[in-house]
Image: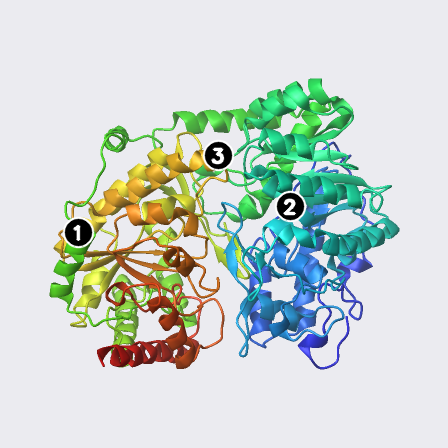
Amino acid sequence: MILCGSVACVRFGFTVKERKLNLLQVSKVKFSIRSMASHIVGYPRMGPKRELKFALESFWDGKSSAEDLQTVAADLRSSIWKQMAAAGIKYIPSNTFSYYDQVLDTTTMIGAVPPRYNWNGGEIGFDTYFSMARGNASVPAMEMTKWFDTNYHYIVPELGPEVKFTYASHKAVNEYKEAKALGVDTVPVFVGPVSYLLLSKPAKGVEKTFDLLSLLDKILPIYKEVIAELKEAGATWIQFDEATLVKDLEAHQLQAFTKAYADLESACSGLNVLVATYFADIPADAFKTLTTLPGVAGYTFDLVRGEQTLDLIKTSFPSGKYLFAGVVDGRNIWANDLAASLKVLESLEAIVGKDKLIVSTSSSLQHTAVDLVNETKLDDEIKSWLAFAAQKVVEVGALAKALAGQKDEAFFAANAAALASRKCSPRVTNEAVQKAAAALRGSDHRRATNVSARLDAQQKKLNLPILPTTTIGSFPQTIELRRVRREYKAKKISEEEYIKAIKEEIFKVVQLQEELDIDVLVHGEPERNDMVEYFGEQLSGFAFTANGWVQSYGSRCVKPPIIYGDVSRPKAMTVFWSTMAQEMTKRPMKGMLTGPVTILNWSFVRNDQPRFETCYQIALAIKDEVEDLEKAGITVIQIDEAALREGLPLRKAEHAFYLDWAVHSFRITNVGVQDTTQIHTHMCYSNFNDIIHSIINMDADVITIENSRSDEKLLSVFREGVKYGAGIGPGVYDIHSPRIPSTEEIHDRINKMLAVLETNILWVNPDCGLKTRKYAEVKPALENMVAAAKKLRAALAK
């Protein structure tokens, strides 16, 4: 590490050499369990108690040094590697740790820094790295979007023909050496070169038709430099994650994989190359391409979500190659059915041979919670049904031992008993809920009046100005506010004291919005810990963790509820707070709900019934809440479906079925309200252009949607002639960045919207909720937003 009084001089990814790291003082670790044929695709990096989150936020706030941050990161990596080695895992990943995002790490590795960050070459430092991720006072962040169909967000590379690629981050090599110093030989993991380009976008000013794959010859030399250093350091395996192979690819895209690996073959000589796919079945043409790639020794397949891939393996797996069989679920938290997995593995062993079969996870475990051992208050019965990342590592090890003839009979017996307990538990099934959800399948559930007529009726009641302003829902969650909720949960303060504190916070938020002259208000959601967890806590069929955190983006973590049984709503969930807030103002106060598809997609969902059945059950519960809010006098109700696009299957052939039940679930929630009740929904950080017709089919009165960080590509769908008659609020500024946009910047952005959208349907709002921001950022940003809207109203009135 280089220290010269500036964060910019800290070399990103370097092991701290100046301090005496206890993990490097340890002599080579000796582990008693012999490594079996086992592999982990990737592992959570936040830490069991979100240690990295707190270290990052402390560093960003200037409360700790770069060295402090690196110390926490190194200790986390050390712990993870030792844990896997102790469990007998043979192929342990390295370079799956990240300070923000693995795709951004690849961007730094190849030096693809957009010019606006003024990087001058050399090893990329934290200043540049975090500016790309979060923006800074001068420039906005890079676009962020969902990683395939998960709730994890990656930083989208911005590429073009003028980018000068250079080896600019030695993170992968340094982490390999760091693990080796601990006595742990690892498999360095990279986003594969072809997938990296397919996950990128043309930079601003570059033609949208620019062929990103044309850059392949420019980035492969960087990969070769890294490979050469890894070989010199002693690496024997290297893993390329090429998950785009599970998507519908065109012939020239598949050819790019063959070209890339043919080019890398000589550089990889002496190394075993593993190519990993995950999240879905791999198409037959992609399977053929993958299994004939030059110089590749083995392949990882998701055999949890990709059950049909088994047929391809059984009929056409190449002889002499390694099969890394992903039988342990990397996306959910249910205990593996060890007996069933062992049967699958034994059938595969007969095809590929005992020495070529490796037990693996279906994907990286970064999408699961970290360690069940930290859940000391979780219901014992439900806890026995679960396996977090640490437990999944043990499951992989147990299956590998069983496959090698060293089956732990007691472990397998305990697993079978837990599975039987879950299957027979009376708390899982509610017959009345099952019948009600089943009855929904044959109906359409649409509001009787079309959206144009409804908007007229609503305007008469609400009397809003043109370009009405609003926010998405949440306001900053202060330390004091979190303390109040924590103390109430721990019964350190009374219910009366809690209600008083939350009421005061709501009043403060309402006052602020009135001072800012925002048209449709929100209560700020001070009573809510998370937009899904809050509702799950009040619905039947849900369980909750204390430390089941999963990374969403950067330092942002969520704690998904666990849906273990049939879902129903015992009592009203939001009516008390919404009516309290409405009584504080004469302006419309939005009732704030999370939609059924988002609750489903942002929970750990039961795997013993189809997802759509669970979604219909949640939709009925939210429907009850919507109708109770309307009865209580709330005339604007927002039902957020932030995760609708996220759940879209990766294969086009499966889109229609998903969109049919997902959109139907949303319509179920509000089919019974009056024309004068305005239904809003919100979506964020995904590419919505390809599902715009399904969004229209949701039949919401107003939709607010992410727009600013993605270079307003949402607007292109309207430029291309899609007619949208409902209200729409494409976000005018990015709330995931600390920068405060000027009135002029927002004014220009709204003007771009007015070029393609009718004035009478356009709303003005931020991209997303304000929960993660500070009031010092929120107040001036909203002031500028309202000022820009008023300036345009005045111009339009002339």
For residue 455, above or below residue 667: below
To which quarter of the image does residue 717 belong? bottom left
- Mark pair 1, 3: CA separation: 35 Å
> Does dot 3 land on a helix, a strand or a loop?
loop
- Mark pair 2, 1: CA separation: 45 Å
Q: Is residue 316 left or right of residue 309?
A: right
Residue at the spot x=68%, y=34% of the render? 290
> Does dot 2 land on a helix, a strand or a loop?
loop
Q: Mark 3 points at which residue?
A: 385
Q: What residue type is labelled 2?
A: Gly
Of the residues under marks 1 and 3, which one precedes in the sequence?
Answer: 3
Q: What residue type is labelled 1?
A: Asp
Q: Is residue 743 left or right of residue 120?
A: left
Q: Which sits in the foreground, 714 or 501?
A: 714
Residue 147: x and y, percent?
53, 50
Disc marking residue 541 = none
Residue at the spot x=50%, y=25% of the render? 417
To which quarter of the image does residue 129 belong? bottom right
- Mark pair 3, 2: CA separation: 23 Å
Which numbered disc, 1 or 3, marks the residue closer to the eye? 1
Q: Name the residue under label 1.
A: 628
Of the residues under marks 3 and 2, which one precedes in the sequence?
Answer: 2
Q: Which sits in the foreground, 338 or 594?
A: 594
Q: Mark 2 points at which residue?
A: 42
